[in-house]
Image (tube, rainbow, N blue to C red):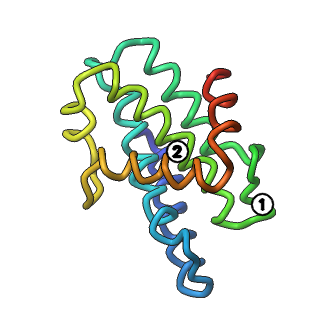
Amino acid sequence: MNQEQQDFYIKLRKKIESYLLKHPTKYSDYLLLAPDLFHLIVKLSLDPRVPAGKKVKFAAVIAYFISPIDLMPEAFLGPLGYLDDIALTAWVINDFINQTDPSIVRELWAGDQDILTVVKNIITAADKMVGSGIWKRLRRKI
């Protein structure tokens, strides 16, 4: 991770933890995954075993995470605005897992839970939250 990404990771973790102390939500468990998911996609984007086409997708998701302009802007929603970033990250990781060796993802994952279960749970929750039709259209664009 370069310094900018490391700084973003640390700020993101502190911001989410601080927010959740004051405003617990039914999405707390997902929000707490955001820093580890960000860390994972950065590591995947730098790993020489990852095909160039997948690295482009990971780089796009990193940019989406960092960008203040997205579907659910953090500027207006606070850390709840990271829910779309988390869902998009899970979808891109799932796509990678389905087309390559999942051991790479497991090796680079710094979180406490099984990454395959995490990704599955996020995608299931996202489908319930916004409907699978919206996610299908969004996935086709990416």
Q: Nearer the viewer, residue 19 or 4?
A: 19
Q: Quadrant of residue 51?
A: top left
Three-letter code for the amino acid on which mark 1 is drawn = Ala
Residue identified by numbered label 1: 75
With 25 as the anchor, is 116 left or right in this view? left
Q: Give residue 58's position: percent from left, percent from top.
A: 48, 29
Residue identified by numbered label 2: 4
Q: Which quadrant is home to the C terminus?
A: top right
Q: Nearer the viewer, residue 37 or 92?
A: 92
Q: Give residue 125's position: percent from left, percent from top.
A: 52, 55
- Height in image: 111 above or below 135? below
Residue sitting at 55 percent across and 68 percent down?
Answer: 27
Q: Residue furthest right?
A: 76
Residue sitting at 44 percent across and 21 percent down?
Answer: 55
Q: Give residue 89's position: percent from left, percent from top.
A: 50, 41
Q: CA distance from mark 2 to mark 1?
A: 19 Å
With 54 as the anchor, is 128 left or right in this view? right
Neighbour tally class for label 1: few under 14, some 14-19, many 20 plus, Cα within 10 Å: few
Q: Quadrant of residue 141?
A: top right
Circles 2 and 1 in contact, beta carbons < 8 Å: no
Residue sitting at 42 percent across and 37 percent down?
Answer: 41
Q: Residue furthest bottom?
A: 22
Q: Quadrant of residue 73?
A: bottom right
Q: Give residue 133's position: percent from left, percent from top.
A: 68, 36
- Height in image: 115 above or below 41? below
Q: Nearer the viewer, mark 2 or mark 1?
A: 1
- Height in image: 21 above or below 47? below
Three-letter code for the amino acid on which mark 2 is drawn = Glu
